[in-house]
Image (cartoon, helix red, strand yellow):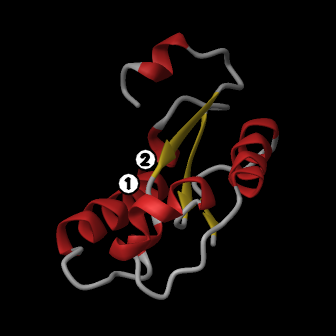
């Protein structure tokens, strides 16, 4: 984020990616859950420290259908989301005016 902010236009946007484990951890996911939750907190705090007009958000996807066959065993009880839904989340945050938001897609 520190490096990117210097290369953006005055109304630029930085979008990070976390994951569903921030909100719905599963057994054995404490480290990944901590990192995802930290990204949420970071975005909420850091968005106010960026130059005026620069937006910072985080997209938090669930298990994606395209990778469900390979990773479903790590996410018991999680319902996969479509890649289209995930694309729409990124597209909306890039084109929108959100600042300091966690966009959950699950």
Residue at screen point 44% across, 71% down: 72
Check the image and report above or below for 58 versus 53: below
* Residue 42: percent from left, percent from top: 38, 54
Q: Which residue is mark 2?
A: 46
Q: Secondary structure at mark 1?
A: helix
- Circle number at residue 42: 1
* Residue 60: percent from left, percent from top: 53, 60
- Within 10 angstroms of label 2, few (less than 14), some, or many (20 or more) residues? some
- Within 10 angstroms of label 1, few (less than 14), some, or many (20 or more) residues? some
35 sits left or right of 40 in the view: left
The picture quadrant where one finds residue 10 is top right
Q: Closest to the observer: 52 or 33?
A: 33
- Circle number at residue 5: none
The picture quadrant where one finds residue 27 is bottom left
48 sits left or right of 99 in the view: left
* Residue 11: percent from left, percent from top: 71, 25
Check the image and report above or below for 93 versus 31: above
Q: Secondary structure at mark 2?
A: helix
11 sits left or right of 45 in the view: right
Q: Quadrant of the C terminus?
A: bottom right
Q: Closest to the observer: 96 or 44?
A: 96
- In this rendering, the count of numbered labels is 2
Marks 1 and 2 in Cβ contact (< 8 Å):
yes
In the displayed orientation, state which residue is furthest to the top: 7
Check the image and report above or below for 85 versus 76: above
Q: Nearer the viewer, mark 1 or mark 2?
A: 1
Q: Closest to the observer: 34 or 77?
A: 77
Residue at screen point 27% across, 60% down: 35
Residue at screen point 37% across, 56% down: 39
Residue at screen point 43% across, 47% down: 46
Separation of disc 1 and disc 2 at Cα? 6 Å
In the displayed orientation, state which residue is furthest to the front: 69
């Amino acid at each position: 984020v520190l490096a990117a902010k210097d290369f953006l236009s005055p109304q630029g946007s930085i979008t990070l990616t976390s994951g569903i484990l921030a909100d719905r951890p599963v057994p054995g996911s404490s480290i990944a859950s901590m990192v995802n939750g930290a990204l949420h907190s970071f975005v909420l705090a850091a968005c106010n420290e960026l130059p005026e007009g620069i937006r910072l958000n985080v997209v938090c996807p669930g298990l994606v259908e395209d990778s469900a066959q390979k990773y479903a065993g790590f996410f018991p009880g999680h319902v996969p989301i479509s890649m289209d839904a995930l694309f729409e989340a990124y597209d909306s945050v890039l084109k929108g005016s959100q600042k300091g938001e966690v966009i959950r897609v699950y």
